Image (cartoon, rainbow, N blue to C red):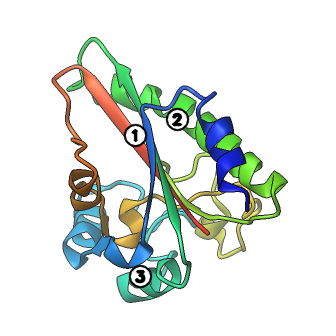
Amino acid sequence: MNITLLEEQLSQLPLYTYFYTDPNTIEFSQRIRYICQTECPMYGRTWACPPAVGAVEDCQKKCRSFQNCLVIGTIVEVTDSADIEQSLATRHDHEMITNQVRDLMREQGTEPYILSTEACAICSRCAYLDGLPCRMPEKMHPCVESHGINIIPTLEAQGLDFIYGSNIVTWYSLFFF
């Protein structure tokens, strides 16, 4: 892949940040998975979430089988970030940018493994609930946290924060390639 070309294209997108990291430096944690299991209403309801994505160890092995990881971040201001519905409504724009980056990588012949923000909302009812395969695996991006990834140490290593203030929402996607 031509990284210079990709970076020229990334600079044209409304990204807050992007950087590359070694997949072996990313922190995987059972604690993050536990939060999914105990606090997320999507747990067990979609192919993009646990347990469908596999055990944390398997997710870690898959992610670390790649040589590189591109991390992209977007940032958006809302009137009240404590309003979860308002904050989640900003996710769609991030997902559109994630798909643009995916397409740029595919144009160069690279098929990235993408983790993003979603518990997958492509279909009105996930095939997982009916014991069927994902209808759109080429479009579905599992959630970063579904893999047990604690993104905060990766961001801190780049001098970035995860929380920028009470009315700021940050979104991150990871592209393993």
Residue 1: percent from left, percent from top: 73, 62
130 left or right, relative to 118: right
- In the rendered structure, find residue 171 and report the number of the disc placed on it: 1
Amino acid type assigned to the residue bearing label 2 in the image: His
**Would you name the residue on which mark 3 appears?**
60
Picture coordinates of residue 38 (x, y %)? Answer: 23, 64
- Report which quarter residue 108 is drawn in: bottom right
Helix, strand or loop under label 3:
helix
Q: Is residue 110 above or below residue 11?
A: below
Q: Is residue 78 left or right of residue 6?
A: left
- The residue nearer to you, when weighing 32 against 130, is 32
Distance CA(mark 3)–CA(mark 2): 24 Å
Three-letter code for the amino acid on which mark 3 is drawn: Gln
Q: Which mark is residue 111?
A: none
Label 1 sits on what residue type? Trp
- Which of the two labelled residues, at mark 2 and mark 1, occupies the earlier sequence position? 2
Q: Secondary structure beneath disc 1?
A: strand
Q: Choose the circle earlier in sequence order: 3 or 2.
A: 3
- Label 2–label 1 contact, CB within 8 A: yes
Q: Which residue position is annotated with label 2?
A: 94
